[in-house]
Image (spheres, helix red, strand yellow):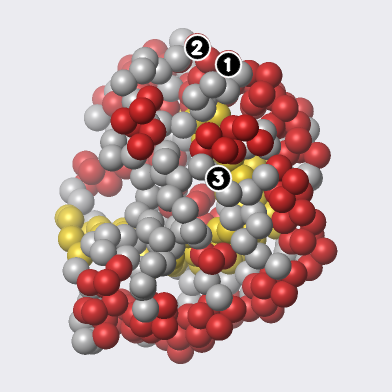
Amino acid sequence: MSSRHLYIHIPFCHRICPYCAFFKHTPSDTDMRGFVRAVAKEAQLRLPVGFAPRTLYFGGGTPSMLSPTHLENLVEGLRRVADLSHLEEWSFEANPATFTHAKVEQWLRLGITRVSLGVQSMDAATLRMLGREHTPEQVIQSVQILREVGIPQVNIDLMFSLPGQTIDLWQRTLEDTLALAPNHISTYNLTYEEGTPFYQQFGQQMVDEETDEAMFNLTDELLTTAGFRHYEVSNYARPGCLSLHNLACWQGEDYYGLGPGACATLGHTRYANAENTPDYIHALAAGHLPPHSTEHLSHADKRTERLGLWLRTDIPLPSSFLRSQDFPYIQELCLEGLATYSTEEGLTLTRRGRLLADEIVLGFM
């Protein structure tokens, strides 16, 4: 299938959060003009002639750190090689307190339709522990700016099972978030990733599965009662506000990735750009693709990945993806209340099943 999706990685952050394992760094002495030119050049080298994406996602890092001039030049470079007039969704990650009315007005003028705010918590002490620079009050102000300017959709990212976080604290964060009336809420169970300060500090502790499950169930109850659809393990949306880009990835659609540290899946090939911004800029300034790795995915690899991602959603997995030898296992999942299945509708994990999605997928391998 031809890709209709494009991801662009902007690796810059004001401060490096101690829990984050994504490729990111402070701008320090990065040549930002050179970076913008490099992304535009990679688009020219990688994207097919006539490329017209359905979704575009600027992730990071903190894309909202880009100055208006650098963002304008980056988008202009993209438009020279891609037709952005058919976009159904343009997502842009931002941190609270890193933008003004003027910046958001530019985002809207460029065509950005969805802003995803990295909030993480609405508790001031928790935010300090996470190394976040914003306050709960600045979150409220940021959402107000986005609404006043007219950004169509606002997502709020939250994290639970944090060090020292009680269920009551988590409930207050959820309630405060609902009061902001976002279109979409993402709630991530903190995992301690190797190589992060949090892993060194807390990673040897036993994961408290009971607390994880209690917080997961509380989230589901509060948000679905408020009218959100729990359409993926970590994601909730108002009607008509699903993340089209992420949903495409979860359903196994191809996508291109641009930027240092970005990866892509095209058919049975995956490439991943090296996580080195100076090398990225240098290679593209010389007219070459950046340093990257390439991996061939077997049919078994693709099937396992598709099952693993699709089953995290509430959209039934079509029967055509299943093998005859899968059905005894599916019957067992249904008897245990972890899944529902019918030939016509396909396979769907229940709420309890999606909590165990990663483990359940192993049974299909």
Give me the residue at 66% from left, 57% from top: 97
Residue pointed to by mark 1: 214
The residue closer to the viewer here, 160 or 310, is: 160
The residue closer to the viewer here, 339 or 36, is: 36
Quarter of the picture containing the C terminus is: top left
Vertical placement of residue 303 versus 364, above or below: below
Determine whether label 2 and label 1 are within 8 Å by CB: yes
Vertical placement of residue 196 versus 101, above or below: above
Q: Earlier in the sequence, mark 3 or mark 2?
A: 3
Residue pointed to by mark 3: 132
Quarter of the picture containing the N terminus is: bottom left
Give me the residue at 22% from left, 79% from top: 283
Cα–Cα span, label 2 and label 1: 6 Å
Cα–Cα span, label 3 and label 2: 27 Å
Cα–Cα span, label 3 and label 1: 25 Å
Vertical placement of residue 69 versus 331, above or below: below
- Residue 145 can be seen, yes or no: yes
Residue pointed to by mark 2: 210
- Residue 346 can be seen, yes or no: no
Residue 31's x, y, as percent? 37, 78
Assign a secondary structure to mark 1: helix
Residue 325's x, y, as percent? 26, 25
Q: Earlier in the sequence, mark 3 or mark 1?
A: 3
Residue 295's x, y, as percent? 18, 56
Determine whether label 3 and label 2 are within 8 Å by CB: no
Choose top left, top right, bottom left or bottom right for residue 228: top right
Give me the residue at 23% from left, 43% from top: 301
Q: Amino acid at mark 1?
A: Ala
